[in-house]
Image (cartoon, rainbow, N blue to C red):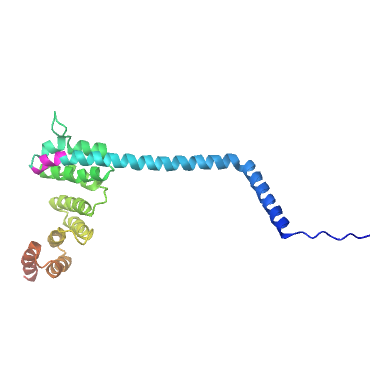
Amino acid sequence: MLTKKKKIRRKEIKEDKLVTFVRNAQIFYEEYKTKVITGVIVFAVVVFGAYYFITQQQSANEEAGIALSRVMKIFDQGSYLEAIEGRQGTNIIGLKKIVEEYSGTENGETAKIYLANAYAYLGNYEEALKYYEDYNGDIDIYKASALAGQASYYAAKKDYEKAADLYLQAAKVSEINAQNPDYLLNAAINYLNAGNKEEANVLLKKIKDEYKTSQASREADRYLALLKE
C-alpha cells in the first residue's frame, strides 16, 4: 500500500540549506585554515609596516624641517660654506648632513635645493648640478628651481640648446610660479645663443603677451629688437 508522502515545509528547506552552508564553511575552513591564518597575518604585517613607515617618515620630515630652519639663518646671511658644513659646537647641522640623513623626506629634498644653491654661489658647479639633478620632492617651486639650476650649469658650459630646454621645462612646472617670466626669458636668450631664433621669438612674444608688467617683459623688448636687425 502506498503511503502518503510527507510534505516538506519551507522552514525545513531553509534550515537544511543553512546546515549545509555551515557544514561547507567548516570543511572549507579546515581545509584552508592554514592559508587563511597566514593571509590574515601577512595582511596585518603589511598594514602595520605601512603605518610604521608613514609614522617614521613624518617624524623624520619634522626633524629635517627643524634642522633646515636653523641652518637657513646662516644661508640667508651669505655664509654658504658654513651653511653646507654646519656650525660646530651648536645644534646647527649643515645642509649636506641634512640631505644625507633625511633624503627622501620633503624637507630633506628641499635641503638639496639650498645645498645646490650654496655650492653654485661658491663656484662649485659640478656639486651644485649633482644635487639639482637629485631633487625628488613634490613641491613645484623647487622642482622648477632644480631644472633652472641645471639650466644655468649648461648655459655656463655653452650648451645653449640644452640650457634653453631646461629653462622652458622649469617654466612649465607650475602656472603660478612668479619666476616663470624669468625662466622664459632665459630660455629665449639661450635659444638665441644656440641660433634658434624662431623659438626665441615665440618665447619673447609669449612674455610680452602673458607677463606685461614683469621686468622680463621689458627685457624682452631688447631681444625682440635684436631679432629685427
Horizontal relation, residue 111 to residue 26: left or right: left
Q: Quadrant of residue 47?
A: top left
Q: Is residue 23 visible?
A: yes
Residue 200 rendering spot, x and y as whole percentages = 15, 65
For the image, the number of numbered tags is 0
| In front of the other: 32 or 223 | 32
Residue 40 rendering spot, x and y as whole percentages = 51, 42
| In front of the other: 66 or 166 | 66
Secondary structure mostly seen in the magenta stretch: helix
Tell me the magenta residue range: 70-76
Q: Quadrant of the C terminus?
A: bottom left
| In front of the other: 99 or 163 | 99
Horizontal relation, residue 50 to residue 199: left or right: right
- Whether 71 is among the magenta residues is yes
Residue 224 rendering spot, x and y as whole percentages = 9, 68
Above or below 213: residue 140 = above
Horizontal relation, residue 178 to residue 3: left or right: left
Residue extending furthest toward the top = 89
- Whether 63 is among the magenta residues is no
Residue 50 rendering spot, x and y as whole percentages = 39, 43
Q: Is residue 124 visible?
A: no
Above or below 164: residue 54 = above
Q: Quadrant of the N terminus?
A: bottom right
Name the residue at 72% across, 60% down. 10
Name the residue at 69% across, 50% down. 19
